[in-house]
Amino acid sequence: MGRSLAVNLGLYTLARLALVAVITAVVLGVAALIDVQVPLVVAVLFALLIAMPLSLTLFKGLRGRVNADIAAVDAKRRQDKAQLRARLRGESEGDGPA
């Protein structure tokens, strides 16, 4: 469960960073074509602004897998926490609320 989350989150992060890099290259390329000087920082900031909403649509499947993995890890954590509290109250596995 946790390994799947780490892999999917890593893939999603790399995809978003690659998108920012591609958009930055496009901005710098277009600026060079029209003979305008654009500082790298400005191009990266512009790329970040464009990539944020664009990544929501382009990487919808990856984002959905990350969200599902987070939900699974959270459910497991809640279940473990409930079991621990039951054991601290002195209840056995089958004595807990149904």
Image: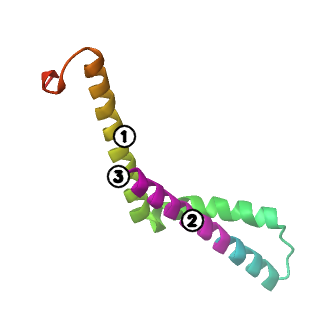
Magenta stretch, residue numbers: 1-22
Residue 21 rendering spot, x and y as whole percentages: 67, 70
Asked if disc 1 and disc 3 are in contact, CB closer than 8 Å, the reply is no
Q: Is the stretch drawn in magenta largely helix, strand or loop?
A: helix
Describe the element under mark 1 as helix, strand or loop.
helix
Q: Position of residue 84 (x, y in %)?
A: 31, 25
Circles 2 and 1, Cβ within 8 Å, touching? The answer is: no
Q: Position of residue 53 (x, y in %)?
A: 54, 59
In the picture, measured across the screen, residue 39 lies left or right of residue 81, that is right
Q: Gap between marks 2 and 3, in whole Å? A: 19 Å
Identify the residue at horizontal 75%, vertical 67% (top origin): 43
Q: Is tag 1's residue or tag 3's residue first in the polypeptide sequence?
A: 3
Side of 77 relative to 53 (left or right): left
Q: Nearer the viewer, residue 90 or 35?
A: 90
Q: Is residue 29 above or below residue 62?
A: below
Label 1 – label 3 distance at C-alpha: 10 Å
Query: Which residue is situated farthest in the bottom direction here?
Result: 33
Q: In the rendered image, which residue does mark 3 sit on?
A: 68
The residue that mark 1 highlights is 74
Asked if the stretch drawn in magenta spans residue 96, the answer is no
The quarter in which the C terminus is drawn is top left
Residue 35: which quarter of the image? bottom right
In the rendered structure, which disc, 2 or 1, sits on the residue that comes first in sequence? 2
Residue holding disc 2 = 14
